[in-house]
Amino acid sequence: MSVTKGITYFILAIVLLLVARHVMVLCHEWTHGTVAWISGYKDSPFAIYYGDWTLLHVDEDVDYGRIMADGKGWLVSLIASSALVTNTLLFLLSTFLLSGCSARWPWPARLFVFWFGVVNIAELFSYVPMRVFFSGDIRNFVTGLNISPWLVLVPGTILVGFGLSRVFGHDLPLVIRTTGLSGRVWQRLFLGVLMFAVFWFYGGGLDAFFPWENSPGFQAWVTFSAVLGVAMYFVCDRYCLRPPYGWDNGLWLKKVPRCRS
């Protein structure tokens, strides 16, 4: 891949990643809003707090305290978990489409589908295991049902782990080989962007260096995420960018033609 094509690829890749994230965030928050609206606790499904254009401070703006005061803890759990169900379904849809999409699809479409799957599973990772004991949807879920966070942490971590394994062991090698991303340097740069997004942005690795939460327990989790991201970079560099091209593809992927960029 020439320098010009490589730069063009990466500019488009970053743009598509940002677009995918914004679409995912809106789907996530609007799901909260829709369930709260249907339940009579919101005037509109779209009446959420958007913050600015980055959507970094977006919030569903649901009055969970009022719902709990009405004795509807189950509804708090339903509203809180509904968005995570949406993320799960969107991730499954994305990885299915990526595996089965026609070779006639333009490579930017494949790349967008890949990123959309990534941001959805990364969103789930940011809750389980990262924030089960601290804040967010999972915390509201266990509070509403008055159950131990461990009942979510153990099975949730296993399921999210399988999802991340699917991304790294299947979707990553597939998208690299079918979008024309050739050259080990460019592939490693792409891998770095992926690891940063999953483990340092969503997983909270950046918080290990720029902490916003002073809890020692939370800092332990985000430090673990930062270290895991570095470790997974080298694992994927060895097993996903060269034969056997991941651990969930089989020999068939060697026969997948590279798309022309």
Image (tube, rainbow, N blue to C red):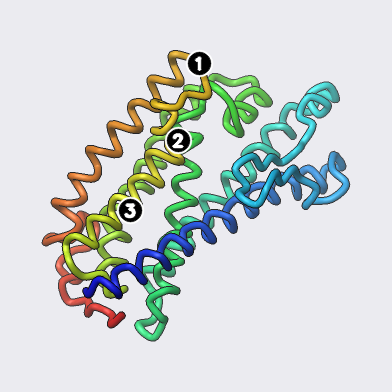
Task: First in sequence, mark 3 or 1: give its number.
Answer: 3
The picture places residue 36, in percent across and down from the top left corner, at 78, 42
Q: Secondary structure at mark 1?
A: loop
Q: Which residue is mark 1?
A: 214
Task: First in sequence, mark 1 or 2: give its number.
Answer: 2
* Residue that lies at the very extreme toward the front in this rendered image: 4
Measure the alpha-carbon separation of dots 3 and 1.
33 Å
Q: Are marks 3 and 2 in contact (CB under 8 Å)?
A: no
Q: Nearer the viewer, residue 12 or 128?
A: 12
Q: Amino acid at mark 2?
A: Gly
Q: Amino acid at mark 3?
A: Arg
Is residue 178 in sight in this rendering?
A: no
Q: Nearer the viewer, residue 122 or 54?
A: 54
Q: Which residue is mark 2?
A: 156
Task: First in sequence, mark 3 or 2: give its number.
Answer: 2
Measure the alpha-carbon separation of dots 3 and 2.
15 Å
| Location of residue 225 (image quadrant) | top left
Left or right of 2, for residue 140? right
Q: Nearer the viewer, residue 114 or 69?
A: 114
| Location of residue 146 (image quadrant) | top right
Picture residue at 49% right of the left edge, 51% below the top: 120
Q: Which residue is mark 3?
A: 166
Marking on residue 167: none
Q: Secondary structure at mark 3?
A: helix
Mark 3 is surrounded, within 10 Å at the Cα level, by few (under 14), some (14 to 19) or many (20 or more) other residues, namely some
Q: Are marks 3 and 1 in contact (CB under 8 Å)?
A: no
Picture residue at 45% right of the left edge, 35% below the top: 156
Q: Secondary structure at mark 2?
A: helix
The picture places residue 240, in percent across and down from the top left corner, at 20, 56
Q: Amino acid at mark 1?
A: Asn
Left or right of 31, for residue 115? left
